[in-house]
Image: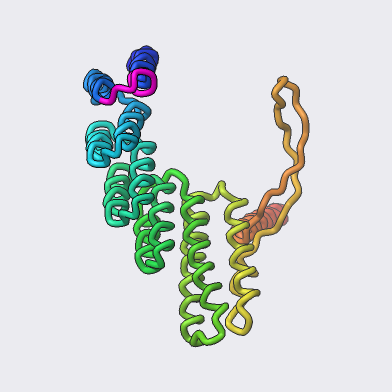
Amino acid sequence: MIHEEKRFWQLYIYLWINYALYEELDAEDVDPTRDVYRKCLNLIPHSKFSFAKIWLLAAQFEIRQLNLKGARQILGNAIGNAPKDKIFNKYIEIELQLGNIDRCRKLYEKYLEWSPENCYAWTKYAELERSLSETERARAIFELAIAQPALDMPELLWKAYIDFETAEFEAQNSLDLTEEEQKRECLQRARRVFEKALNYFRSSAPELKEERAMLLEKWLNMEAASGKLGDVSLVQSKLPKKLKKRRQVTTEDGSARIEEFIDYLFPEKIQTSNLKILAAAYQWKKKQKLSSGDN
């Protein structure tokens, strides 16, 4: 019911948008334009549903009038009344362009308080800190992110965290004057993140086989490129076997066809399979002995 009601509201909102654009661009009247946006926003039942587009258009109008305070007030009200990803992202983008880093941090904190499962937001927050050379802040954000009980795209988050740590190691490794102990610590830190990521994929997302295989390949490459500090044997025992398989898929026209794909068989699966074979062999041998005894 709400979905149907919102659909009708969308048509209504576009009338208000056209009205506001007419006042600003054709009539060139600032105050009436502001009034149109204000009235429209007051009409929407934000507790039931809202529209990020109208909030953003109203804020962008104020920015064009060089009224930054007014734009912030609109975006702040949007976050308070009807928080949405688009609103947070645009507000952060505006503050970042203005160089207001502390405001960006506060917005990310509000964003993640509202949506703690949002891997994209966690990743962008960490990227911001890294761009400011705030390595420890970025690392702390990644650690907070992976500690969340639920995540919407964990593969994105783990990839970003690993890319971050491997980049930090490569930066250290490229400096000839860097102490070997520092390089070793950096490598160990990257290894710990790889281990955490692999444990996650093994226990919580076993269906993401290709992502786990790519992770291991990245780790192997890092060890191989690390010279005397590297140890490829740490990874080799964890690598999966690649198996070519076939499956039937349905095409868009409804017909069926066979396609080849790569499956990955990881060491723990191989071990489990071997144990099952041994158990089956033991049971067969036991039955054979019982059968011989009966005779």
> Who's the residue at 37% across and 14% down the image?
15
> Who's the residue at 32% across and 47% down the image?
112
Residue 5 vs 207, above or below: the answer is: above
Residue 295 vs 234, above or below: the answer is: above
Residue 167 location in percent, x, y? 53, 67
Hey, which quadrant is residue 224 in on the image?
bottom right
Residue 34 vs 292, above or below: the answer is: above
Nearer to me, 239 or 178: 178
| Image coloring type | rainbow
Residue 106 location in percent, x, y? 27, 51
Nearer to me, 154 or 89: 89
Q: Is residue 288 left or right of residue 72?
A: right
Nearer to me, 209 or 124: 124
Hey, which quadrant is residue 30 in on the image?
top left
Question: What is the magenta range?
Answer: 23-30
Count all numbered tags in the image, as a single digit.
0
Residue 61 can be seen in this image? yes
Residue 190 location in percent, x, y? 49, 70
Nearer to me, 225 or 275: 225
| Quadrant of the image containing the N terminus | top left
Q: Is residue 79 left or right of residue 183?
A: left
Residue 283 can be seen in this image? no
Q: Residue 146: within the magenta?
A: no
Residue 79 location in percent, x, y? 26, 37
Secondary structure character of the magenta stretch overall: helix
> Who's the residue at 76% across and 37% down the image?
259
Q: Is residue 35 left or right of residue 57?
A: left
